[in-house]
Amino acid sequence: MIPALVVIAYLAVVVYIGVFAFRRAQGKDEVEDYFLAGRSLGPFVFLMSLFGTNMTAFAILGSSGHAFHNGIVTFPLMASSSAFVIPLSLFFIGTRVWALGKRHGFITPVQLFRDRWETSHVGTVIFALQAALLLPYVIIGVMGGGTALQAISGGRVPFWLGGALVALVVMSYVFFGGMRGTAFVNTFQTLLFLGFGALALGVIGSGMGGFSTAVDEMLKGGAASLLTRERISPLYFLSYTFIPLSSIAFPHITIFCLTARKMGQFKKTVILYPLCIAAIWLPCVFLGVMANRTTDLPEIREKIEARAELAAKGSALSSEQQGALRAKMNADDVLLLLLDRYAPAWLAGLLGAGIMAAVMATDSQILALSTMFTEDVFTHYGGKARFGEAAQVHMGRGFVVALTVLAYVIALRAPETIFALAVQYAFTGFSALSPLLVAALFWRGSTKWGALASTLWVALGVIAVGVFQALVPAPVPGPPTVVLSIGGLPALTRTTGGTAIFGFMPVVPITLVSALLIWVVSALTPKPGPETLRRYFQPRH
Amino acid sequence: MRCGHDQATSRPMNRPGLLLATLFLYGLHQDFWFWRSARPLLLGFLPIGLVYHAAYCAACTLLLWRLVSRAWPQYLEDEAEAASGHEPPRS
């Protein structure tokens, strides 16, 4: 129970920080202060908060769970590719978004698109797709909170109570503190989980008597492949470098780029981002792999046995039996199990708080959805003119409450797997929407029709992948199911982890076609007026 | 800016060099040469594939430091500060 009490104390500190931030916000421009922290964040808070916003529960729980079954490949697949792509996108795109926000007073990306392409309805279509792709995150965040608190308390705090507690805490500081509260809480949380990795590595390594023996035994036994990348194909590996393109296209990240006081605030963030990623992911991935040697824990032994059984006689099993084995294999709790096994109770509580910090990264998504709804729908369609400027913040706060309650109710009733899948599709969708930002910021010739074609294609592509994966069940580990061949080449295959198109993940063709469509359709359709182009592409001397 | 000098640092810029370095670093991410090998082990327990990508993160930081110091788009901030509040969006 001690770890759960430490975590609950941590949640109280988080609420206090949110309320403290709310008090600091008095007397400033209300709308920009609530939604963008008055565009006033300094370099340290900007770095910590932007990084924390990008690191969801997956960075700690999911990464170790993925590494448990797939090995060290998890790190280059998801972490070092992000270490390359995300800071570059902040450098090239984030800085330009900041500058345009400063010049024209934009609060959301859709406001930028509407102004840049002289359109109203195409902006609404982009808003609808962004909101649909972002919503599952909020639901999965509430579910993650409930699951984590239940695991940390050893089952004493039930899922419904843990989820309610986390939802209430997040709602409180987003409601009162807005972007400023969220940024300060994220800074505190990021500091906590930056320290988490090294501490967990030290404690668990010491408890296991060092890692050398465990690694030697894995190399001699059947688990040697977990210490290499042979479980993943090179094309699949290459595909994954498209996924971090999603980061800058996620509305909560684009909106966060507008909060910096000066553009110079981006400098430290861009430079230090790869090191922050390594500090969190490296220990979590390595510990996830090492968990394969902790077979004295029955929960871990059960996962390893389920994996072996699925690999050995998978095709002979019914789909229900395969599903049951996959459920047993779920390894998102391996780090919690290792902490429970090796860390003293008070330290397990502190480390549990680090995990909760990552789980609660959903705050930025709640605020982003609230900001988008208020600015892109309520204000855009006359709400501000009819009810006044003060109504904008009231509407934003009301939306935060409504969204959190809705997410909690859905989290109690719906199976987690549905939303976990939806989050996977969201990465593909936002990666494929990134050409919109590039075209808006760098290409004079881009048009609203090109943007519309690209947006509709992305929506269609994500739905098609979802339907395909629902209709064609995942094969057991081994050769994939080839659904369509062209010229003897497997064009469309259903793999254990998803779908492959000519060996690539769907994100590759969907993103490339999205870029092609915005280019071709823009070339064939009328451009925005010269005054708009002058404001975005004025000559420099 | 357009005449080849970084306004923030007043040092000559080497944009083709930075572009090549960026593309080269992207290529280095696809390290097929360590694909099936766990050894050598750093400190006796860290597989080479993991060590390589930890070092890759450090190399990313070096490249980004170079980009920030040599190609920072300072003109964006200068223009935004000058025009702030004077150019409201039309929609």
Image (cartoon, coloured by chain):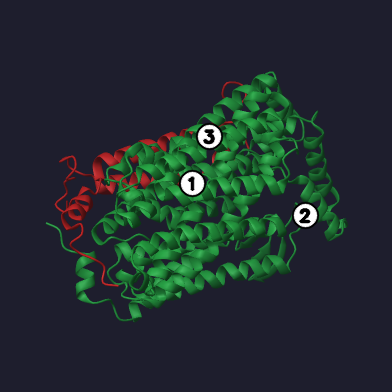
A478 vs A520, left or right, is: right
Chain rendered red? B
In three-dimensional space, the C-alpha distance between marks 3 and 2, rounded to whole angstroms, equals 35 Å
Q: Residues within 10 Å of mark 2 (few under 14, many from 20)?
A: many
Q: In this rendered view, identify the residue nearer to me: A367 or A510.
A: A367
Q: Circle 2 is placed at which residue position?
A: A476
Residue A445, picture quadrant:
bottom left
A25 vs B57, left or right, is: left
Mark 1 element type: helix
Report the disc number at residue A193.
Answer: 3
Q: Residues within 10 Å of mark 3 (few under 14, many from 20)?
A: many
In three-dimensional space, the C-alpha distance between marks 1 and 2, rounded to whole angstroms, equals 44 Å
What amino acid is labelled 2 in the image?
Answer: Val
Mark 3 element type: helix
In three-dimensional space, the C-alpha distance between marks 3 and 1, rounded to whole angstroms, equals 19 Å
View extreme (left): residue: A541
Pointer 3 chain: A
A246 vs A68, left or right, is: left
Q: Is residue A300 above or below residue B23?
A: above
Q: Is residue A219 visible?
A: no
Say which quadrant the C terminus of chain B sits in: bottom left
Residues beneath discs 1 and 2 located on the same chain: yes
Residue A356, picture quadrant:
top right
Residue A518, picture quadrant:
bottom left
Instruction: Give me the residue at 66% from left, 60% from top.
Output: A410
Residue A13, horizontal then vertical, whole percent: 52, 35
Q: Circle 1 is placed at which residue position?
A: A173
What amino acid is labelled 3 in the image?
Answer: Phe
Q: Is residue A474 above or below residue A182?
A: below
Q: In this rendered view, identify the residue nearer to me: A241 or A335.
A: A335
Residues beneath discs 3 and 1 located on the same chain: yes
